[in-house]
Amino acid sequence: MKTLIASLLCLLLASLTVAAADLNQVVDKALAGERVDGVKVDGHHFHVLPITIVRGKKGIAASGMISHDIRLRPDDQISYKIVIKEGEDTKYDIRIARGGVEQFLPIPDNLKGKTGKLIDGDWEPSCQRIIDIIAAKLELE
């Protein structure tokens, strides 16, 4: 029940906060196997690639990629896996292959990710919102 309420709240929040791109429609298209380009969330641009879904007896696993569109530099690539098992909390595995300036400059490990935020802003929460909506829709199935 707690997961269902969180899922519904997440869907409601997405519909209230994003006017330029309806994230619910974007996620529906990606779940149906379409690539969706030009998704704008909080001023950040993304490409949402088709989502692979595996349904099993004990739950659902979904995986996909989102590309953070950066001008004049290689895009950040986000790969994610969502695992939903009945009676358990939803599990996420999210990995970021950073593009941007980190592709061109030798950046010390302790500063990786921070240089991009100075130039490209804090885009990760916007990407996480897309992934959360994917999980919420899968939980409602």
Image (cartoon, grey):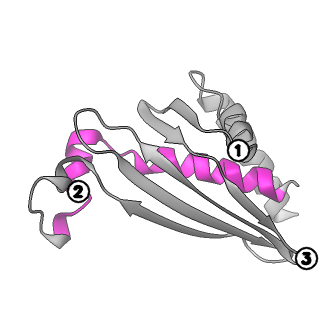
The mark closer to the camera, 1 or 2, is: 1
91 horizontally vs 69: left or right: right
CB under 8 Å between discs 1 and 2: no
Q: Residue at x 9, y 56 (%)?
A: 105
Q: Looking at the image, tell me whether mark 1 or mark 3 is earlier in sequence order.
A: 1
Q: CA distance from mark 2 to mark 3?
A: 42 Å
Q: Callout 3: 10 Å neighbours few (<14), some, many (20+)?
A: few
Q: Callout 1: 10 Å neighbours few (<14), some, many (20+)?
A: some
The residue tagged 2 is: 114
CB under 8 Å between discs 1 and 3: no
Q: Secondary structure at mark 2?
A: helix
Q: Residue at x 67, y 30 (%)?
A: 16
Q: Residue at x 18, y 71 (%)?
A: 110
Task: Specify the quadrant that holds the N terminus.
Answer: bottom right
Q: Residue at x 67, y 39 (%)?
A: 34
Circle on res. 33? 1
Predominant secondary structure in magenta?
helix
Q: Amino acid at mark 1?
A: Gly
The residue tagged 3 is: 57
5 horizontally vs 23: left or right: right
- Write down the region rendered in magenta: 110-139
**Residue 9 location (% of width, % of height):** 75, 46
Toward which corner of the image does residue 44 lie, by quadrant?
A: top left
Q: Amino acid at mark 3?
A: Lys
